[in-house]
Structures are given as structure tokens and as C-alpha cells.
Image (cartoon, helix red, strand yellow):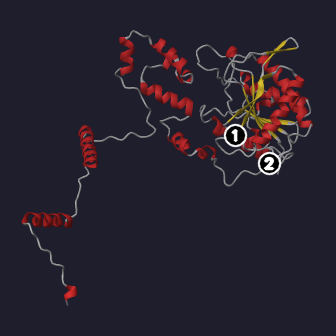
Amino acid sequence: MARWRQPVVIWLRRAKKNRYWAQKARGSRPWRRIPWASAGLYGATLLLAAAVLSKMPAKLTSIPVSTQLTVPGHPSWLDRALTHWKIPAATFESWLNRGLPLMGLAMEPQNFQVHPRQLLTAGIRVVAGVRLNNLNDLLAAEIPQLRTVKPLVGAPPRHVSGAPRLNGQNEVNPLLPGDQGRVWAKLGSNPIVGIYQTHSHESFWPYVPSGPAAPYSTDWSKTIVQVGWWLSEDLHKEGVSVVQSRVDNMSEGLLASYSKSFYTAKQLMSWYPSVRMLIDLHRSADDVAPAVIQGAQVSKILIVVGTSQLLPNPFWRQNLRIAQELSKALKKVAPGISLGKGIDMVPYRYNQQLMPADLMIEVGGPNSTLAEERLAVDDLAKALNNIILDGMTTRSN
């Protein structure tokens, strides 16, 4: 039994013995550290919540989503500051337009008020196309596909070239140029080229009344939509069948335009499966000096190719090859018409992932005239016809 006995410890000094057993006692109890940082944050949160609740009214009132957002009757801190500095509201509006050009579209002189809430809501409405007092707009901002939902049972039938036009294809806007104002203008049978305008409101300074900070307009005869119709006519004269979508892709704001034009382009491809080239027609955002060709001023042309640097674009190499062929053809048709090197490669794909030969083409800039644009698209149509005849736009399976 000796082997089960505990070892015997002989203590020579009582103080050392007492220290030993005190340490043993401390080691047997778990040491609990108080998380002072977490406790402090938790306590601060409770105090803040109590302060907020103390300011709440005894009876809460609900505000429906559809309520109109209004500006409070009392002057804002911004208004008081401008009054103190003796700065007129018109001067502040001018500064705002210069610093944030898109705000010039939101602020109308008769409705302009120096209040941060109105500036914010108006800016969101114009830039993002979302009205904060509209539940449908708020839901569509989170779920963009809701904008495409139509009260139909089942999907619309696929259009076959040569078949009667569907109801949607016969939609008419009398203000649109050419083809009796049809929103979907088709010249020739079995269209090969499809044209649409993501920034459909793009216009030109010579035709925009003074006041807006950016040259946008819905007078279609003075916008990029008119330029697209001229390109369609010129392509048809060259013997190329073409369809132009005049859907207003900026109807819900600038930032929503590419989302809407994506579905516009998909609809174009569905209704006209014979299309082998898509062109998103723009003008440059910056002023572009015109080229002088045979004694006439002509808007310069730039081809924009979106890569797959940020988002997948399986067709960007084919698009680049088509852009290079088109750039060469333009230099032959109208030497000097290309802007810079003629091609601008960008990391954004700009809806160019839909098919091969999907290009964005910029014609002129905001300072261009319609006469310069008219001459430019005539040369562009000739160059496009040349590469189409060379068989450069065959869609891969």
C-alpha cells in the first residue's frame, strides 16, 4: 500500500509553507477578467438609446412612403450661412452647377431653394432616376428587373424576320424623326445592324437653351437619337438593312440608363435575330474640335471598346478586332476623322458583352453642330458598309 501514499513534504520555514498553499488556493479558482472596453461600449450604447427615446413624442405618427417630401418652413443652416455671407441664391446655384453639373438638371430657377434636403432628393431623382416618394421606384432601384415586368401572361413570342410586326414594335412617338415616328424604326428586311442610344438625351450646346449645366434635351430632332436616324438612313442607302431603337433609355435618370439600355439591346436582339452588329451611339462628354475634310467641318469619331478588366466580357477581343477594322476603314474613307488614335479601350464593358461586333461609337461632342454630325455619320456608314462587305461581322455560334 506504500505506493499509493502521497509524498511527504517537510517544511523548514512556516512563511514559505503559507505562501505555497496561498498560491495553490489562487490557482484553483478561475481568474475572471472584466472586459472593460466592451462594458464601456455597451453602457454608452444604452445611454445613447435612452437619450434618443427621451426625445421621442408620446404618440408616434406614421408617414406613408408616398408622402411628398417637403422643405421645412424655417430656413436651413445653409440658407442662414449664405444670408450671413451676403451670397445670392443665384450665385450659389451657379457654383453648384459648376461643381456638380448634373445638379443643373435638377434645379429649375422657379423651384430652386437653398435647402440640403431638396438638393439631395432632387439630385437622387435626376442622377439615379429614383423618386424617394414613390414606392415603385424604390423597389425597382433594388430589383431592376421589376422595370421590365409587363402585365402579360407568358413571354412575348419571338419575332421572325419577315413576319408581321408585333404590337411593341409598332409603338409610335410622333416627336421621333423618320419612319412615321416609330420607336423601333426598321429600314430594309432582315436587319444586319442594330442601333440604340443609351444616353438618349444627349444633345449639343448650340441647340440647348442657356441654363442647364449639361447639354441634354428631349427634343429628339436635336439629340443623338436624330444622329442615329441619319446613320440608319445612310446605312440603308449603302445597301445595309438596319433597325434603330429609339427607346428613351434616360427616362429614369443618367445612372439607370445602362441598366435600361441593356434590356433594350436584348429586346432588339430578340425581335431581330438577323442583327450581326450592335452600335450604341453616343457623343463625347468633352468638347471635340471638328475635323476639316474636303473643306467641310466634320465631327470626329471615337470607337470605345470595353474590356473584361472589371466584369466578364467574353467578346471584347472580337469587338477590338472589329473596332480596328472599322478604324482602318474610317481613315480610308475620311482621313483625319478619327479622334486621337481612333480607339479607346476602357475597363468597363458598357453592355458590350451581348454579342461579337458590339461597339460603342462616339460622334463629336457637346460643342458639335448637327451639320457636323450629319457629315460624320455619312462617312461612318460608308466605313461600316466596307467592313460588313468584308465579312468582319459574322456572329459566332
Q: Which residue is mark 2?
A: 159
Residue 138 seen in the current view: yes
Which residue: 39% across, 14% down? 82
Report whether 139 appears left or right of 362. left
Residue 376, quarter of the rendered image: top right
Q: Residue under circle 1? A: 351
Mark sitting earlier along the chain (2/1): 2
Label 2: few (<14), some (14–19) or many (≥20) C-alpha neighbours in 10 Å: some
Please name whichever residue, 125 or 29, is drawn nearer the observer in this view of the structure.
Answer: 29
- Residue 396 higher or lower than 240, as above or below: below
Q: Position of residue 73 (x, y in %)?
A: 36, 23
Q: Which residue is more in the foreground, 380 or 56?
A: 380
- Asked where in the image residue 241 lies, by quadrant, the reply is top right
21 is higher (above) or lower (below) than 338: below
Query: As drawn, which residue projects farthest toward the front?
Result: 12
- Residue type marked 1: Asn
216 shown above or below 308: above
> Separation of disc 2 and disc 1 at Cα?
22 Å
- Residue 92: percent from the left, percent from the top? 47, 15
Three-letter amino acid code of the residue under disc 2: His
* Residue 184 can be seen, yes or no: no
Instruction: Tally the numbered discs.
Output: 2
The residue nearer to you, when weighing 73 against 349, is 349
